[in-house]
Amino acid sequence: MNEREPSQWREHLAEILPMLGRLVAVVGGMVEQRAEQVVVAERREVHRAASILALLLAAAGFACAAASFAAIALLAALGETHRVLGTALVAGGFAALSLLAILLARPTVKPGPSRQAH
């Protein structure tokens, strides 16, 4: 074999290795930047979901308070003479609201593996 061949390989390798190092650095920088963008987007989504959950809990609390005040007002309006009728109306109203909530929530719940039809 010719002695120049290994030196030529070394020269070519000496030219290629810095370019390869720069290429790896550029690709690594792109991956790092993309990963940072994903983390920022994930934090935004978590913040958004937490704020929606807090608002939903507040709305549920206000709805329960409103329903309680409505029930008390109905019982007070009917008075002592129609106490049983008032109680039945309040119970029926709460049952209707519960049924409505179940029917509204049903399409949003996706079936899990055990609930899927075979």
Image (cartoon, rainbow, N blue to C red):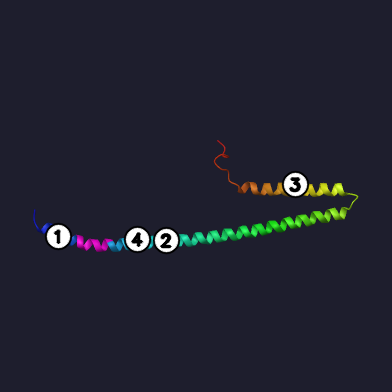
Q: CA distance from mark 3 to mark 4?
A: 60 Å
Q: CA distance from mark 1 to mark 4?
A: 28 Å
* Residue type pointed to by label 3: Ala
* Residue type pointed to by label 4: Val
Q: Can you identify the residue that label 3 sits on?
A: 95
Callout 2 secondary element: helix
Q: CA distance from mark 3 to mark 2?
A: 51 Å
Q: CA distance from mark 2 to mark 1?
A: 39 Å
Q: Mark 2 or mark 4: which comes first in sequence?
A: 4
Q: Can you identify the residue that label 1 sits on?
A: 8
Q: Can you identify the residue that label 2 sits on?
A: 34
Q: Mark 3 or mark 4: which comes first in sequence?
A: 4
Foreground residue among 118 and 13: 13
Q: Which residues are magenta?
A: 13-20
Q: Position of residue 60 (x, y in %)?
A: 69, 56
Callout 4 secondary element: helix
Q: Is residue 3 magenta?
A: no
How many neighbours does mark 2 have within 10 angstroms: few (below 14), some (14-19), or many (20 or more)?
few
Q: Is 85 drawn above or below residue 117 in the view shown? A: below
Residue 50 shows which numbered tag? none
Left or right of 77 in this view: 58: left
Q: Mark 1 or mark 3: which comes first in sequence?
A: 1
Q: Residue at x 69, y 49 (%)?
A: 101
Q: Residue at x 17, y 60 (%)?
A: 10
